[in-house]
Amino acid sequence: YEMKMFLKTLNNIGKLYSISNCARFSTKIINVQNEVNFTRKRKMKAWHLHSYGNLDEIKLSEKYRTPFIRNSEEVLVKIHAASVNPIDVAMISGYGSTLLNVMRCNDLEFPLSLGRDFCGTVVDVGQNVNRSICLGDTVWGVVPVHLQGCHAEYVLVGADCITKKPKLLTDLEAASIPYAGLTAWNALFSTCLNLTSGYGLRNKRILVLGAAGGVGSIAVQILVAECAQVTAVCSSDATEYVANLGVTDILDYTSPDYCQNIINKGPFDVIFDCAGLGPSGAEKYPWKYLSYITLSSPMLKNTDESGLITGMIKNVFNLMEPNIKSFSSGQGTIKWSFFRPSLEGLSYLAKLVDDGKLKPYVSKVYTFDKIPEAYTKILNGHMRGKVVVNMT
């Protein structure tokens, strides 16, 4: 009898525990559903452009239309934090608008909201969204450059542009990584086809120019995690910061011996230009390399200045010319690399964070109403780490 009563008591406790869990889960779903219903009938705050120009064109609207799910693979996210990147400031003046408008198809160009990476809560999902993403999940992600950005209360993105936020990061820290991280990841693992995550980078000799910047600082951490032989280039006042990222071989580009030092360190398997030297930077010094990858290509500038067709023809020649010079002098290939949204890349970055091998550095935090000041900070250049906007 005592055993029977004991088992009955355990059963009752189990029922109470299940009811408690269900109640908490139901409360979470109800709260998120209330958020969904609220967003469907309200306007939101957003910073946007109505025309290209300077920073004065950025305006705050409190009656910006809240986006809604338009296809079955989209996700609506309420923004907690978002970062500000150089591409945001460049787009204010119309940079890339010719090609980006083609990518937008029939979507309107203006009003245009900026912002490329974020952290926030999922408040609505399309019917075909993977079940690993649920209402109420805290996620981090990116917005493709041709779509409406995340410097707003809500953003609509494809499910392949987000993953769950790494638990070790705060919302502000999480918002600082995705855009710069995917730019670095794409350059090292997609653009440079001879490097592969897990084994291709080990013992490769890689020179990173601009190692203290947003992309460069993440690139060197990826390379250290992959056991590459990293040589990082930065200014003298950034050497301590770069050393704290795990790099032991650091060159100061302001040193009078810089040119000779860089020659002595070579040859390199890859030179990764995060410093804005561009394709012509490949011949700036007599260094030796198998691949030279730059983030500063003339592609968008050419299409802006010459139109889509003529601009793309110029791009072909602009890519071929330095490669012909490079091959004729016994060097390797020169490649352009760009930011590219990638679920695989986000998952890779999240694993590095979880393993303690990727750490963000947020240099400055602004409130939502101070976003123009954040843009000014980026415009002034020479950043250490990332500028982040607190949306809450």
Image (spheres, rainbow, N blue to C red):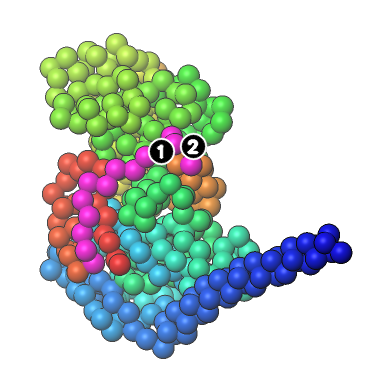
State left or right for residue 23 relative to residue 32. Answer: right
Residues packed near mark 2 inside 10 Å, few (<14), some (14 to 19) or many (20 plus)? few
Secondary structure type for disc 2:
loop
Q: Which quadrant holds residue 390?
A: bottom left
Q: Which quadrant holds residue 232?
A: top left
Instruction: List the single residue furthest toward the front.
Output: 2
Q: Which quadrant holds residue 140?
A: bottom left
Q: Which residue is mark 1?
A: 358
Q: Residue at x 37, y 31 (%)?
A: 220
Quadrant into which the N terminus falls: bottom right
Q: Which amino acid type is shown beneath numbered disc 2?
A: Asp
State left or right for residue 52 relative to residue 342. Answer: left
Quadrant into which the C terminus falls: bottom left
Q: Are marks 2 and 1 in contact (CB under 8 Å)?
A: yes
Q: Report whether residue 364 is seen.
A: yes
Residues rendered magenta in the picture: 354-368
Q: Residue at x 46, y 50 (%)?
A: 167
Secondary structure type for disc 1:
loop
Q: Which amino acid type is shown beneath numbered disc 1?
A: Leu
CA gap between label 2 and label 1 equals 8 Å
In percent of width and height, residue 28 lies at 52, 72
Q: Which residue is mark 2?
A: 355
In percent of width and height, residue 58 lies at 19, 70
Q: Residue at x 16, y 46 (%)?
A: 381
Q: Residue 22 — which label?
A: none
> 180 or 247, which is in the foreground?
247
Q: Is residue 375 above or below residue 22?
A: above
Q: Is residue 347 above or below residue 330?
A: below
In percent of width and height, residue 155 lies at 40, 69
Q: Report whether residue 329 is seen.
A: no
